Image: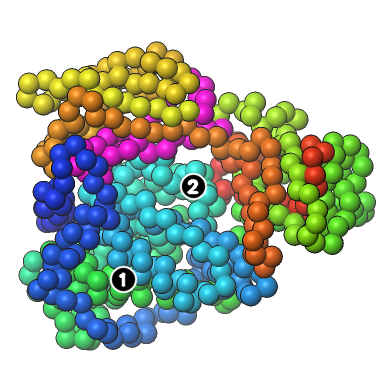
Amino acid sequence: MKKIFYGTLCYLLLCAAQSDAQNKLSQEQAELVQLKKYEQNNPPKMSMPVPGPEENEQLFGARLMRSATLLETSNPNRKLPVFVLIYGQSITGSKSFTDNVREYLEDKFPYADIRIENRSIGGFGGEQLIRPAVHDVYRACPDLIIFHVYGGENHGELETFFSNVRRYTTADIILLNHHINGSKDVIKYNKSSYDYLRYIANKYNCELVDLTRNWSRYLVENNLSVKDLLRDNTHPNRDGNWLMVQLIGRHIRLNTLYPSNWYEVVRSYYVKNAYDMDSESPLKFRGEPWKMIGGVACGENEKGSLCLTFDGSRIDLVAGIVPEGHKMGTARILIDGKPVSRNTSLYTITRPSAGPGTWFPLIRRIEHKTVLIPEKWTLKVDAVNADSTVWTFSVYGSKTGFDGSGTSDRAFVSKSGRVVIAPDDFMFVKIKNTFKTVAQPGFESTWTVEPLYQEFYSTPLIDDTNKVYKTTIVQGVTNSLHTLEIIPAGDGIVPIEAIEVHRPPLR
């Protein structure tokens, strides 16, 4: 494991040499610099043999029933949205890997409306990644998470990550164990880590992709050396990234041999059922029933609202599609009889921006002890001591204003309580030691506070009537019983086909 982290560290240092000390360096830029340097003498192969069938391949996809169903049942007349989030460190953080994932999924599932984001942080092992995950993952609403990281096994950080994913999201998870790497042409692996990741996959219902076993087999069956798939001692080259995606992709399949229980975490309520007085549907109209236009229920004014009692923490509205010529309107959203904005806990904080000459966030995690409001925050470096070990800074909110000053060697609580930073979450010293760059006076890191709700729902712009358009109107309420009320504002029609309720499996 030490060799792995040493290889990663060397990679970061090499990348840092390419950047100006006070400029932010993207991970994709760093990866491309190193990949192009490697490929000057080691061009990628024109073609690679397709991996042979895997043992127990008939079991693949059993833990991806929801995301695989969305992907495989999409068709020309019903293109379902699927959000794929890639997370981890540099192994999954490269542009080459992201591009391969996108190409593979779009080719295999041509009718799905696929969105892919890679929020990996190269150089952040499991012990560190658990800190920014609160900004990157838990409120992202992905349908599928592809995850790989080294570390975080000995002190529970890795298990905490998966526990939180199951507590705050309804995402399927693909967990990768470790590919074969090293400086010598010897196939070996860490059995303790191998077994631990199997334990995590089984406990938290993750689809485990056995890179360790199948990477080894691919090398042997195709008479390749370990270095043939790496651009250094750790990171896959383009051929290695291609292989990794092939091994992942064969798991993404709708396996009808296994019963699906994802109806327990995501339930769909179709508005048409609200017209049936004898229906057991919890959807009901309060006041005047909505009008039917083109087979779709459409709210027009506040005399008739749509109500739902639900058990969960997130609500998505599926837009109804009506004939052209109708003016679209808005609707107020009430949760438990109150405007959704009255719930003061429904805010999230984005990941703070990077430090100088790196993609590392300058601060791993921002917390708070008082109620947040939507605004942009800036941490500005005011001074650095003589040996660059302690930084003095000030924080400013776009609405709160100046909110106090502090130093990087102590816990910081802003005057309003809207910014709380633990000493270990300041990355000044880590960035200095790894990248040899120092945040100078005037350097700024920013983040924003964003609402996890829409106080008014507006029908999205429909540019393809064969697509399914979903809007998350609230997430992050307590995972329990609530009431939802949708009240048209009277400024046009509000067509809604269905309401989706997400109930994460852990309470």
Residue assigned mark 1: 244
- Left or right, 284 with respect to 215, comes to right
Which region is colored magenta? 346-374
Residue assigned mark 2: 140
Q: Amino acid at mark 2?
A: Ala
Where residue 239 sits, quadrant-wise, is bottom left
Residue 237: image location, x then y, percent: 21, 69
- Residue 76 lies, with reference to residue 148, above or below; the image says below
Marks 1 and 2 close (CB-CB < 8 Å) = no
- Residue 218 lies, with reference to residue 364, above or below; the image says below
Q: Secondary structure at mark 2?
A: loop
Judge whether residue 42 can be spotted in this image: yes
Q: Secondary structure at mark 1?
A: helix
Q: CA distance from mark 1 to mark 2?
A: 24 Å
Q: Is residue 242 part of the magenta span, yes or no? A: no
Residue drawn where x is 8% and y is 66% of the image? 183
Task: Give the mark nearer the N terminus: 1 vs 2.
Answer: 2
In this rendered view, identify the residue nearer to me: 464 or 226. Answer: 464
Residue 245: image location, x then y, percent: 35, 71
